[in-house]
Amino acid sequence: MSAQDGRGPMVDNPWRRQLVALRGDLLKEMDELRSLLAGCCADVGGGEIWVGPAADAWHAEAQGRRTDILAQLGRLVPLVEAAIGTCAEKVTVGEAKSLQVDLL
């Protein structure tokens, strides 16, 4: 839409902008967690830091939780992307103000 369609000037949709930022934050956190937790899991239970049955049990639990956290975050990304797909890229100034209030 453009200003010529009678709706007035168009601006970026603040709701869509927030969803795009959320998607970026999720992807960043997933990358950080993937590398951060991998080191801990590798060092324990067969690693050099702590060995033995208790270390093996801790390793199995930590690895399972790491996998679960990353899987749950991974399921959020397509949901956010689907929500982004439903948002108009541009809205009128009035619509943007209304959407901005909803974000507060």
Image: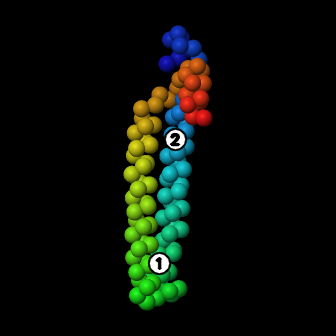
Q: Is 100 rendered above or below residue 6?
A: below
For residue 94, the mark is none
In this view of the protein, which residue sits in the foreground, 19 or 3?
19
Q: Position of residue 50 (x, y in %)?
A: 50, 86
- Identify which residue is drawn at 48% across, 64% down: 34
Total number of numbered discs in the rendering: 2
Q: Residue at x 44, y 72 (%)?
A: 62
Where disc 2 sits, the SS reads: helix
Task: Report the amino acid beneath label 1.
Answer: Ala
Q: Earlier in the sequence, mark 2 or mark 1?
A: 2
> Disc 1 designates what residue?
42
Residue at position x 40%, y 44% in the image: 79
Give percent across and percent down for residue 35. 51, 67
Residue 89 in the image, given as x and y percentages of width and height: 50, 29
Q: Is residue 16 visible?
A: yes
Asked whether, in this view, residue 8 is left or right of residue 59, the answer is right
Depicted 55 relative to depicted 37: above or below: below
Give the alpha-carbon distance from disc 2 to disc 1, as whole Å. 33 Å
Q: Is residue 10 visible?
A: no
Q: In this rendering, is residue 77 above or below 19?
A: below
- The amino acid beneath tag 2 is Val
Tell me which residue sits at (53%, 55%) in the image: 28
The kind of secondary structure element at disc 1 is: helix
Using a 10 Å C-alpha cutoff, classify the residue at mark 1 as few (fewer than 14 neighbours), some (14 to 19) or many (20 or more). some
- Position of the C terminus, as image quadrant, is top right
Residue behind mark 2:
20
Front residue of this view, candidates 68 and 13: 68
